[in-house]
Amino acid sequence: MKNYSTKLIHASIIFCILLMLIPWQGWFKTLQPYWLALAIIYWSIESPRKCGLFTAFFYSILLDVLYGSLFGKHGFSMVAMVFLISKIHRRLKMTSFWQLALMIGALLLNDAFIRTVIDWIASSGNGFSINLWPVITSILMWPWFKYTLDKLRQKF
C-alpha cells in the first residue's frame, strides 16, 4: 500500500471547503459543485485508512458550522457516502474511468437525497425537491479533479 501524505489529504479537503465558501450569485450558486464530497470521495477511494468515517464526519460538521446549516446534515450524508465507499473501494479503484464517473454520480445523488430528506424532515414536511445541478456539475468536474489530485499525489 502506498503511503500518501496526510498533509496533502487535509490540505486538499480544506481547499475544497474554501471553494465551497466562495459567494456565488444567482444561478451560479445552484451550479456550484459539491467540492467537499469530491475530495472525500477521492481520498476515501485512494487512501481509505487515512480518510475514513471520522475525517468525513469532522470536515462535514465543520461545513455545517460554516454554512450555518442544520447541525449534522452534511455529516450524516457524508458518513453514509464514505461507508458505502469503504465497502466497495477496491472495486472502484479497478473500474474504468466512465464507470467510476457514473458511480461517483450515484454516490453524489444519494448524498443529495439524504440532505434533502433531512431538510424536509426539519421543515415539517414543507416541500420536497432535490437540486440536481450540483450533482451534475460535480460529475462533470470529477475528471479534472481526479487528474489534479493524482498529479499532486505523485509529487508527494
Image (spheres, grey):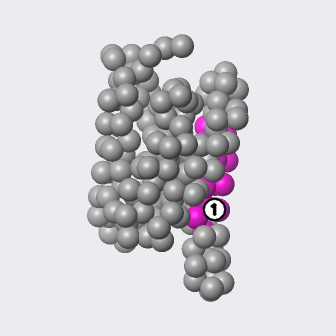
- The percent coordinates of residue 12 (x first, y second) are 35, 37
Q: In the displayed structure, would residue 44 be above or below residue 79?
A: above
* Main secondary structure along the magenta-highlighted residues: helix
Q: Left or right of 155: which side holds 44?
A: right
Q: Quadrant of residue 61?
A: bottom left
Does residue 102 appear anywhere in the picture?
no
Does residue 57 appear anywhere in the picture?
yes
Residue at position x 66%, y 54% from top?
110
- The percent coordinates of residue 112 (x first, y second) are 59, 60
Q: Which residues lie in the magenta part? A: 101-116
Q: Left or right of 131: which side holds 94?
A: right
Q: How crowded is the residue under tag 1: few (<14 C-alpha within 10 Å), some, or many (20+)?
A: many
- The percent coordinates of residue 151 (x first, y second) are 38, 21
Q: In the displayed structure, would residue 19 be above or below residue 118?
A: above
Q: Which residue is mark 1?
A: 114
Residue at position x 67%, y 24% from top?
90
Q: Amino acid at mark 1?
A: Ile
The reply to whether the magenta stretch includes residue 111 is yes
- Placement of the C terminus among the 4 image quadrants: top left
Q: Quadrant of residue 5?
A: top left
The reply to whether the magenta stretch includes residue 27 is no
